[in-house]
Image (cartoon, rainbow, N blue to C red):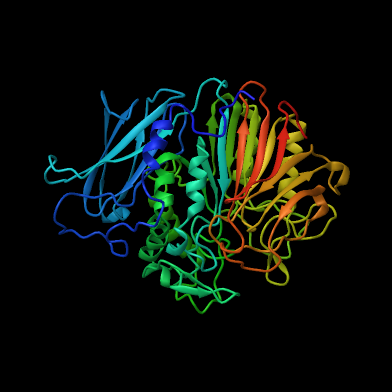
Amino acid sequence: MSHRQPGPSPRRRSVLRGSLAVPAALAVPALAGAAPAFALSGRPKAGWGVQAGDVTAHAGLVWVRSDRPARMIVETSATESFRNARRWRGPLLGPGTDFTGTTRLRGLPAGEQIHYRVLLQDPDDPRRTGEPVAGTFRTTPKGRKEGVRFLWSGDIAGQGWGINPDRGGYRVFEEMRRRDPDFFLCSGDTVYADGPIQPSVTLPDGAVWRNVTTEEKSKVAESLAEFRGTFRYNLLDENLRRFNAQVPSLVQWDDHEVRNNWYPGQILDDARYTEKDVDVLARRSLRAFSEYFPISTLPPGDEDGRLYRVLRHGPLLDVFVLDMRSYRNANSPNRQPDDATGILGARQLAWLKRELSRSRAVWKVIASDMPLGLVVPDGRTNFEAVAQGDPGAPLGRELQIAELLRHIKHRKITGTLWLTADVHYTSAQHYDPSRAAFQDFAPFWEFVSGPLAAGGFPATKLDGTFGPEQKFVKAPSRANTSPAETPPYFGEVDIDGDSGELTVRLRQEGGGVLFTQVLQPGRVGQ
């Protein structure tokens, strides 16, 4: 295959070489548990690192957080020396955004390694700036020669398994960084706002798992300050900060950014919460989410504030990022014969059908924060995802998916596949109408990976409505196994620039490749 080999690309080797000199052990930013103060001495500091996100051929977003009020300045260059650097004046960072900010870079060259550094400038004395914090990313190529590699996974700091200094923190991010991907698709549950982190957890064998803890993570998040602290928590890990500085992100959310299995209009019956209206909690979480991730369709980039969007990665790949949380109907037995709202909402479904029809990319990845054919219950009688365990004709939320799959077939839309996380194990399902109750669709694949840093759970049942066959699964035999017992999972997608072949690899931290599937381009179904 003509795609670059699994090692670093020549353009990034110098970046990697410099990065590897930094120890992988946990390093906590100064003032980790405190909000920035207004009377700090010295120069502004960016101890939480930098991130890039939603990178395209000619644009990208760069993120930073300051320890005090500061002006964000970004410099970009074709080289690490920053000779002939271009300067971008960013926003004034203050308490209104928890001292975070993003700067949109425009007019970048396509298919190039972009080196950037963020400087924080004292707003009262522009001559006073903090130490620059550097990062890098590749812009999307206009041609297909070099191919594409990206990673995906989700589920971070869940079920009480946080940053463990004895294990060197979130080591999986260092392993993923060494894969040198073009970007990382984070498939939701980026944080666990409903999952407090305790100082220690006793494992079944008597060993003790230790966690880094903060005040905000000691209870469920309800206030805006607590949600902000929840999103800050993962950035205490040096592995993640180094990963963010090298790999641009494409981020979606699911339930745990707010609360387990939430849906719009829900009123909570949970003694841990004083705020019972989940819509209030969701608004606070979304504000913090928009402050802590560089996302082009959220304010200030897009006043509509939607999370669903498409990233066009050259002629080989379009990634359609879904939001299966914000527009869904209430969780229920999910057997209603008519369902216009479903799990996507009517407007998002229309958008997805329209954008898939317009796409000219060889491959069209549908980034779904929940699986299609895996049965995910919510209590004894209700269901959380699409499937409800009835293998017959589509009902409830399945009706919306059936409409989408029918559209893909009848419009002859080639090269679709689904990627997801959510269920805390890794698997590969092939869907085929010859096995299905609903048959008006073309075959397709769904790949599941995760968690990155959360509890592992046993595999769930399959629903036969769309004819899934599980080609691979790896899951623990009991619920909520620690990352020490069940290593983190992540997936890798490689698209060859010459042949257009797409290879999916399901990976395990420290254990290499668990499963591989090669897909051929130009087909409606596989």
Say whether residue 290 is visible.
Answer: no
Quadrant (top left/top right/bottom left/bottom right) for the N terminus: top right
Q: How many marks?
A: 0
495 vs 298, nearest the viewer: 495
Seen in the image, is 442 located left or right of residue 149? Answer: right
Which of the 4 image quadrants contains residue 63? top left
Residue placed furthest toward the right: 434
The residue shown at (24%, 50%) is 45
The residue shown at (42%, 34%) is 137
Residue 134, position in %: x, y?
Answer: 32, 39
Residue 442, position in %: x, y?
Answer: 79, 37
Residue 232, position in %: x, y?
Answer: 38, 58
439 vs 505, nearest the viewer: 505
Say whether residue 412 is visible.
Answer: yes
Residue 87, position in %: x, y?
Answer: 26, 30
Quadrant (top left/top right/bottom left/bottom right) for the C terminus: top right
Residue placed furthest toward the bottom: 271
The residue shown at (40%, 42%) is 20
The image shows residue 231, relative to residue 349, as above or below, that is: below
Which of the 4 image quadrants contains residue 329? bottom right
